[in-house]
Amino acid sequence: MSKKEIDTSMDNIISLCKRRGFVFPSSEIYDGFTAIYDLGPYGVELSNNIKKEWWKAMTQLRDDIVGLDSAIFMSPKIWEASGHVKGFSDPLTECKKCHSRLRLDTLLEEAGIFADEKMSEEEINKIFDDNRGKIKCPNCGAADFTPGKKFNLLVQSNLGNFTSDWTKDPTYLRGETCQGIYVNFKNVLDSTRVKIPFGIAQIGKAFRNEITARQFIFRTREFEQMEMQYFVKPGDDMAYYDKWRETRWHFYLDLGFKEENLQWHKHENLVFYAKEAYDIEYKFPFGFKELEGIHARGDYDLSVHSKASGKDLSYLDPTTNQKFIPHIVETSAGVGRTFLAALTEFYREEKIEDETRIVLAFPPKLAPIKIAVFPLLKNKPELVAKAREVFDALKLNWRCEFDDNGNIGKRYRRQDEIGTPYCVTIDFESLENLEVTVRDRDTMEQSRIKISELENFFRAKI
Ligand code: GAP
């Protein structure tokens, strides 16, 4: 695929997101706020549907995983113990000409030179030095940079600190949701019936002071994670790790993603806690990039929190009486990245005669609106009343939208663009024979269905 085509399709997705109320740049009336986005009316529905599917797969359909919702703010001691205060950083360089701050590993990678954020400051600077001149600033084209320096990604705050020099003793907005799971491990163990092996799942916001945030919602400073930590007996972790890799791969196939758009990436340089790590990568318009990380974290997390807090976080096996610190297999996916992957996967442009039809061909479970209901004409009260009646009945079971604006063709196009699988139109005949037209988004075929049959019809389809 040529660069131009890649850019075009990303541009089309971004434009659709703004035009149709999926994603808005944050604080837009104040000229925006870099690397933060808001979800519009259809974006919040899509995002909720993704989270619902994940939550169902990871909790409802299993008897070995329970949920949790820990707070964003936690004791700063957690981030010290976890290693984030010292070790959670990306290499930063500054262009000496335009003063853009850039992520050094990304700069090298874009110039075709292997590097990643997990390399030490010395390692990455050595590669940088060896390739001076080859690397240009993406903003001004200059090739003169400051040496790379590790920059900590934790976002600081003054929560609960009322002094003017709070930066010496900050609290942190969580950099990953899983720390809330580790520090509640004992609470969950003591308050539920879970027995090892078991998991704790959580969906929530995380914050990182990302140096460069490009590629739309792919890398943002505020984002949502869907994380699950699976606690196992030492020695069992790699077998469970393989199972979780398989399970998580199938999650994306079940969402309707094509297998050819997914690939595995094994980490060569591991972060400080990981024993082994694989990413599931998705083929975004800008290439294959990380969608989800699956990590074998060993006993690192519970051990460091046990040591730093002085609380025993070991597990006593009730059958063998054996006591041990559980090992952890983690699955960690981004809501925003799954959202962008879904837009990429299901975005279609079709030529119909001289027109281009844009469709988000979402499976019904992801579609923000499942059914749109239209009266044929908005100035005919009897049609509007009947359409309202149909809408009021369907909305009890599905997220529906009532629309009486513009001609029917335009209303269909609008629903195609937001991915609504079915549209129901009430016309004059409907008042006589109580039948409505149901139009299928993908085939564009229309069929007449009795109003009394609609619920069964949609139950079978959605
Ligand atoms: N607890 C492990 C952890 O946080 P990670 O690889 O740093 O691992 C996991 O992040 C997932 O969170 C990523 O695969 C990605 O989907 C999402 N993610 C991470 N940083 C992100 C960012 N700045 N913007 C959007 N999503 C992000």
Image: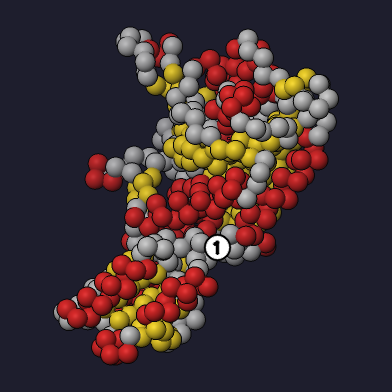
As drawn, is 172 to the left or to the right of 267?
A: left
- In the displayed structure, 33 sits above or below 82; it is below
- In the displayed structure, 123 sits above or below 330; it is above
**Which residue is at a point 33% across and 61% down the rendered structure image?**
19
Q: Is mark 1 within 8 Å of ligand 1?
A: no
As drawn, is 85 to the left or to the right of 14?
A: right
Query: Residue 80: x and y, percent?
Result: 56, 16
Q: Quadrant of residue 63?
A: top right
Query: Residue 364: x and y, percent?
Result: 49, 66
- The residue singled out by tag 1 in the image is 345
Residue sitting nearer the eye, 185 or 305:
185
Residue sitting nearer the eye, 410 or 323:
323
Q: Quadrant of residue 389?
A: bottom left
Residue sitting nearer the eye, 231 or 238:
231
Name the element at disc 1. helix
Query: Residue 349: x and y, percent?
Result: 47, 73
**Which residue is at a point 54% across and 44% down the rendered structure image?**
334
As drawn, is 81 to the left or to the right of 141?
A: right
**Which residue is at a point 75% across and 40% down the rendered structure image?**
241
How packed is label 1: few (under 14 Cα within 10 Å), some, or many (20 or more)? Answer: many
| Ligand 1's quadrant | top right
Name the quarter where the N terminus is drawn: bottom right
